[in-house]
Image (cartoon, rainbow, N blue to C red):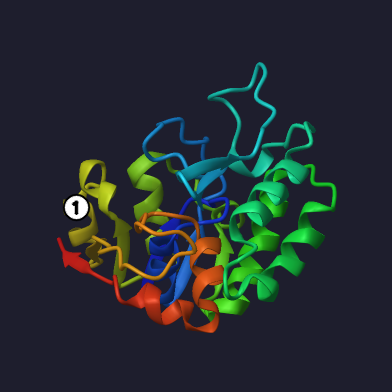
Amino acid sequence: MKVTILQPAYLPWLGFFDRIDASDLCIILDNVLLDTNSKTRFTNRNKIRTKEGWIWLTLPIKTKGLYGNILIKDIELADDKWQSKHLKSIEHNYHKAPFFEDYIYFLRDTYNRKWVKMQDLLDEMLIFFFQKLSIRVPTIKASTIPVKSKKDALILDLCKYVNASVYYSGIFGRSYLNLEKFKEANIDVFFHNYKHPSYQQVFPNFEPYMCILDLLFNHGEDSMNVIRQGRNFVKN
């Protein structure tokens, strides 16, 4: 059983989907605190391509009095017209993309609905992206698994609970996983060192690390083939 564990992400990047596609099971880590690291925080934001380069699309979240003390699954969205702002930015920058009409209908419907819990929005979008990328890997929420560990012990115990034989970690896992404990549990660890592929974008001068919408709008049904070009796992 090859397992990956990821925090949920808003409009995830290509590597997010590659790790899931390579796995037999994906655990969505929804019962941890929001990552506040400016370099690795993608739970409530991601990048879209613009003529000038790229911009962030950020979900405004209610954190007053709660920052650093609220689980991802419990985060609520702030009501500041973010839906219309995000949709307008996407339409403005991608309306000339070859597959724009194939996906914009979903976004228009989604952004025209009221969302309270951030996780509900992320779940809805992930289902859609899985369908369009033909990813059939089952997912479960960490919050539904009776494991109460913290930090790196949580990752190991989740793997044990689902009888994982292989754990696909993000590249940053090198800095916090106790690899000896995984070895004792007979779980092989591979780090996902994704090699970002280049592809045709709507504007010249390729920008990597954009969200999945950038690829879908530009490559449509061939998007999963592009994603797999960057697959690269390194054995511990």
Out of 221 and 167, give the one closest to the viewer. 221
In the rendering, at what x and y percent does residue 179 appear?
Answer: 19, 52
Q: Considering only vertical position in the picture, is 50 above or below 189?
A: above
**Taking 26 as reference, is 34 above or below it?**
above
Q: Is 215 on the left-hand or right-hand side of 225?
A: right
Q: Is residue 1 visible?
A: no
Residue at (70%, 62%) from the top-left corner? 124
* The N terminus, quarter of image: bottom left
Query: What's under tag 1, amino acid-wise?
Result: Leu
Extreme-top residue of the structure: 65
Q: In the image, what residue occupies the spot 41% across and 70% down?
A: 200
Closest to the observer, 98 or 141:
98
Label 1 element class = helix
Q: Seen in the image, is 1 located left or right of residue 144? A: left
Q: Which residue is mark 1?
A: 179
Q: Residue 95, how many percent across, how many down?
A: 65, 63
Question: Residue visible at 53% across and 51% down?
Answer: 9
Q: From the viewer's perspective, is residue 208 above or below residue 81? A: below
Residue 224, located in which quarter of the rendered image? bottom left
Confirm whether residue 126 shows in the render: yes
Q: Nearer the viewer, residue 11 or 206?
A: 206
Say how many tags the image has.
Answer: 1
Instruction: Name the quadrant containing residue 78.
Output: top right
The spot of residue 26 in percent (x, y) is: 48, 67
Q: Residue at x 72, y 53 (%)?
A: 120
Residue 112 in percent (x, y) is at 84, 53
Task: Locate the C terminus and report the quarter of the image it occupies.
Answer: bottom left
Is residue 169 shown above or below 154?
A: below
Mark 1 is surrounded, within 10 Å at the Cα level, by few (under 14), some (14 to 19) or many (20 or more) other residues, namely some
